[in-house]
Image (cartoon, rainbow, N blue to C red):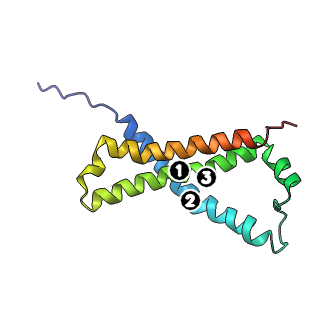
Amino acid sequence: MSIEPRRRVAYPHLIYWFLFAQGGVVAAVLVPVHVLIQGILGPLGIVPVVDRHYDTWVAVLGNPIVKLYLLVLIAVPFFHIAHRVRYLLTDFGVKAAKSVPAQIISYGGAVLVTLITIWVLLTTVPIKIG
């Protein structure tokens, strides 16, 4: 009778891969669609978009859904970038890329960008409900 050792779930690794996948989806789908609508179709007058006037920006950025959308659009791809660069360095043979300090630097940078984005979104225009 053999007793197999109990396997632990690698939760940090699970979170890294989840954020990597979601960042890839956002970078591959949302960013190009946002650029198409806001940067190309809007200026051509095909669809209504947020213009460069202060009153329009204040009205749009007061919406909590818009703030959440911008947070996802800006912050989540940075986790994808952090994960991809760290594994690229690993594939190039940089042994330090697998270390804990490399994880802290890469994912910590993504967390820092997320925190800065949250701070900017919360301090620019107050949230207006209704």
Q: CA distance from mark 3 to mark 2?
A: 9 Å
Q: Count the marks.
A: 3
Residue under circle 3? 74
Amino acid type at image mark 1:
Gln
Residue under circle 2? 27
- Would you say the residues marked 3 and 2 are in contact, meaning their CB atoms lie under 8 Å apart? no
Relative to 108, residue 49 above or below:
below
- Would you say the residues marked 3 and 1 are in contact, meaning their CB atoms lie under 8 Å apart? no
> Sequence-wise, which precedes: disc 3 or disc 2?
2
Amino acid type at image mark 2:
Ala
> Sequence-wise, which precedes: disc 3 or disc 1?
1
The numbered disc on residue 101 is: none
Mark toward the viewer: 3 or 1: 3
Q: How many residues crowd mark 3 within 10 Å: few (<14), some (14–19), many (20+)?
A: some
Point 73% across, 68% down: residue: 39
Relative to 61, residue 6 above or below:
above
The numbered disc on residue 22 is: 1
Left or right: 71, with 27 as reference point: right
Q: x%, y% of residue 5?
A: 20, 28
Badge 2 element: helix
Q: Which of the 4 image quarters holds residue 63?
A: top right
Relative to 10, residue 1 above or below:
above
Badge 3 element: helix
Badge 1 element: helix
Quadrant in the picture for the C terminus: top right
Q: Which of the 4 image quarters holds residue 4?
A: top left
Relative to 58, residue 45 above or below:
below
Q: CA distance from mark 2 to mark 1?
A: 8 Å
Point 60% across, 61% down: residue: 29
Amino acid type at image mark 3:
Ile
